[in-house]
Structures are given as C-alpha cells and as structure tokens.
Image (spheres, rainbow, N blue to C red):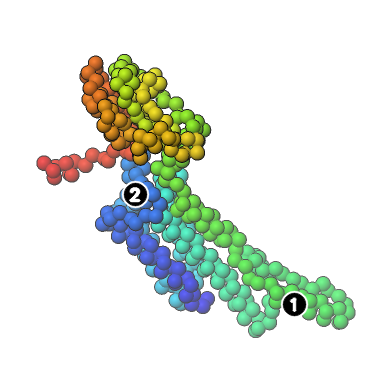
Amino acid sequence: MQALWPVGAVAGLGAVDCAYLTYSKVTQVPLACPVEGGCTEVHRETGSDVLNSSFASIGPLPLSALGLVAYLAVAALSVSPQNKDLLFWLCLTMALSSLGLTGILIFVLQAPCPYCAASAFISAMLLTLVETQRARDAAREMRGAAGGATVVPTNDWASMLGFVAVEPTPNSSNSSNSSSSAVAEASVVSVEAEPRRAVLGLSGLLALGALRGGTMPSRRLQSAWAYFTLVERYKPNHPPVLSDSSKAEMALARHLQKIGAACYSTWWCPHCQEQRESFGKQAVEVAPFVECSSKSRQQLPVCRDADIESYPTWIINGKKYLGGRDLSDIAEKSGFTEYPPEAFKPRDDQLLEYIWGPPEPEEPYDPLASSDNV
C-alpha cells in the first residue's frame, strides 16, 4: 500500500473536530453550533446535553479524546505501506464505534450534533478510502506474484474483493485456443479490483446515519413545526383553547368587555394563543380579543388604524401594553377588584406543550454549588 495522503488529510480533519469537542467538554465552553438548540439542547429525561450526557465519556475520559487519538493514529499509519492491515482494522473499529454512537444520538438523545455527525462521516470516508486502496493493492500484488502476467484469482479471498474469474473454453484447435486466450486476457485486463461490498455498505450506512444525526431538527424546531401545522389547520380561526375558565376569569373577561379594553392578536401568533389559554375556553369567548390578521397573514385595517405593531397588544383605559400578560396584572391595570390576584392561576407547562413543546428539564441539584453560595 502506497502512502495515502488523502487518508492522512481526512484523518487530520477528524482530529481537528475531536480536538474541538474535547476542548468544549473539558472547559465547558459552549460549542459554536449551526443548528438551533442542537449542540447544547438539554434532553428532557436525562437533564443533560449531548456532550455532557452519560454516553459522552468513559469514566473521566471524554470519548472525543479517544477519537482524537484514533484520528492521529490513522494519520501516522497512513504514511507507511507496512501498516496496511493495522490501518484497515483501526478504521473498521472507528466506523463501528461511530455507528453505535450515531444510533445513540438519533434514537436515545434525539438531539442533533453536527460535530458528532461530522466525526462519524469522516470515519466512513476513512474506511472507504482505506478499503478501496487495500483492494487495489491486493490485485497489484497478485499480478506481481505471477511475474507481471495477468492473473485471474479464483479463490474466496479474490471473490470477496470483487474480482471476476474468466477462463477460456478448452478447444482442440490451436487457433481456437489462441483466440480464446486472447479474449480471456482482454476480459481480465478490463476487470478492476473492487472493495468488499460489506465494507462499503457499512460506510454508506454510517454516512447516512451521520447525515441524519447532524441535520435532524431539534425538539424546539419540532415543536415549532407542530404548532405551525396546528394553526394552518384552523386558519383563519384560532386553535381551540383547552383549559376551562374559573369564575374569576369569567368575571375579568366581562369587566374588560365592559370598560372597552381590547387585546389585538392574530390566529398564527403563539404568544396570542397562550394569552387566550390564560382565560380558558369559556372566558375567551367573552374577553375582548380583536383579530388582526387575514388568512393570507395581512394586517387588517382595524389593527392598522389602532397602530398595532406587535402581538399581542393590550389597550386598557387608553394605554397600550405590549406582549402577553398575567391575568392578575391585567386585572390591576384595568381596575378589576371583584376577585383578588391570587384567584388567577397560570396554566402549567404541560397544558401549554401544544404551543411551546415540552418544558425544559430542571437542572440537577448540585449541593456543592449550593454550599458555595452560602
């Protein structure tokens, strides 16, 4: 096997990738992540992100550090043709390890990690490059063993490499034998050595897994898409409110209607939907919500005339308030005194999942950090 500078170059890219992951892991400096919420997204059940999950280390040693050592070893072994077998087995081990870790990334952590996926893709490239060159070198060695003559390998090893055996049909005529031999030799010369299909299949599977692991949407984007499909189903009406209204919420809605207050909102705005949900399904029919968007998402004249620029916007007693509000705050600003502020209970995160997605998990309690603050 000749020195493979492409293998060394690709291994160098993998080393840089793993070095950056190791640096981020050790120093806890957030990764520069091109995917929103991807590299630092906290898993809902484990309470940790991709790099700080239990799968990212073996004891105190980060897996990315092992990857760094492996890539450097591949780069060193690619220089000498004497290391071809060791180089192949090292690349195969790296590819199998990357395949397992990519499966964990996709099916367990369920969060994108472009840098992890890049490392897996580089492992697939290395295995493909090494196996391709290994097959070609095997063919060259077989031909050289015959003193430069064309050799047709017929054993199992050769068939695994993808060679095709072409044998002339026996014939008693010398001219026929000569013609058959010429045809056979021409056929053999045209056959190129091929890498083993199983190895290429592994590389392809790993590459596809890396593509999925690096580009799959984060849970935040999945939640945004889920809400988008929800509002598209009901447009130009608002999605239905799920919670029931309390007596205090009904009384506040009637009070706001009576004093001429208004909440300007749109059917596609998630903050507006959360504000509607705070009233409950009965009170929202009474509360003074004003629709500002047409089906094509154009602002309606009633909101343009009121100089509404963001949603939701409250106008209470002639004053404008931007953004969603707690009902206790709305009650105070509108002079509502029939019920105390404690009567208005905010909706919990589980109820609002259809708008914002699953809530972020709470950080695990760290007694050492707490003691430092005492």
Q: Is residue 295 left or right of residue 62?
A: right
Identify the residue at image location x=41%, y=64%.
14
In the image, is residue 73 above or below residue 118? below
Identify the residue at image location x=29%, y=21%.
259
Instruction: Give the residue number, with chain letter if any, for mark 1.
Output: 186
Instruction: Give the residue number, with chain letter if any, for mark 2.
Output: 40
Q: Could you say where residue 330 lies in the image, as x and y percent from the top left?
A: 27, 27
- Label 2's element? loop
State how far apart marks 2 and 1 are (Cα).
Answer: 59 Å
Could you tell me how many numbered marks the image carries?
2
Tell me where residue 249 sits by quadrant. Answer: top left
Q: Could you say where residue 130 lies in the image, as x and y percent from the top left?
A: 52, 68
In the rendered structure, which amino acid carries the disc numbered 2?
Answer: Thr
Q: Could you say where residue 94 lies in the image, as x and y percent from the top left?
A: 45, 60
Q: Can residue 350 be seen in this view?
A: no
- Label 1's element? helix
Residue neighbourhood size for the residue with mark 2, other residues' Cα within 10 Å, grouped as few (<14), some (14–19), many (≥20): many
Identify the residue at image location x=63%, y=71%.
193
The disc placed on residue 117 is none
Residue neighbourhood size for the residue with mark 1, other residues' Cα within 10 Å, grouped as few (<14), some (14–19), many (≥20): few
